[in-house]
Amino acid sequence: MDRKKELKMLAREIKPIAGIFQIKNTFNKKILIESTRDLKIMNRRKFELDAGMHLNKALQAEWKQFGANSFIFEILETVNQKKEEETDIGEILMELQDKWLKILQPFKEGGYHLHSEGQNNQ
């Protein structure tokens, strides 16, 4: 088997890492917390922000105002996925995101979330 095919096979076998991450504005310390089944999505979020297409309008406006160098992407927690947990991963991620929302309080002046009730309140 040639090396290219071998690498493709290995890439398919690698399980994505689920978890919670934050996008933090280092200028004003505001944050956005997200949960994901694959932490590689952080690259997509950066692309969306660079392209002016992120769904969170407040974050997008400050990305444009302060520039990409004023933001950092940080993994807050990862989920150890086992085969028997795959169907529950969404629920696990919701609970973890709620936990981090309570800890970091990224609402109003502290972040890009509108309010503290519910998970997807950006």
Image (spheres, rainbow, N blue to C red):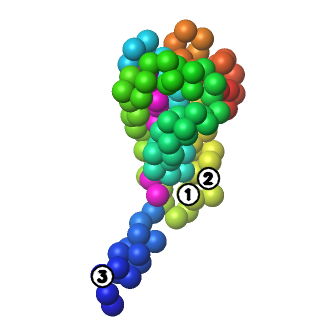
Give the number of the disc on residue 85: 1
Q: Earlier in the sequence, mark 1 or mark 3?
A: 3
Question: How far from the left and from the top, in percent, is residue 12?
Answer: 46, 71
Which amino acid is tagged 2? Asp
Q: Residue at x 63, y 45 (%)?
A: 91
Question: How far from the left and from the top, in percent, is residue 112?
Answer: 57, 21
Q: Residue at x 64, y 25 (%)?
A: 57
The answer to whether 3 is drawn above or below residue 106 in the figure is below
Q: Residue at x 57, y 59 (%)?
A: 86
| 114 sits to left or right of 29 | right
Please tell me how crowded label 1 is: few (under 14), some (14-19), or many (20+) other residues with Cα within 10 Å: few
Residues at circles 2 and 1 in contact by the CB criterion of under 8 Å: yes
Q: Residue at x 36, y 27 (%)?
A: 69
Q: Is residue 31 visible?
A: yes
Which amino acid is tagged 3? Arg
Give the number of the disc on residue 3: 3
Question: Which residue is outermost to the top?
Answer: 109
| 60 sits to left or right of 23 | right
3D distance between C-alphas at marks 2 and 3: 36 Å
Give whichever of 91, 36 is nearer the camera. 36
Give the number of the disc on residue 88: 2
Which mark is in front, 1 or 3? 3
Question: Which residue is outermost to the bottom?
Answer: 1
Magenta region, residue range? 16-25
Give whichever of 47, 15 is nearer the camera. 47
SS at mark 3? helix
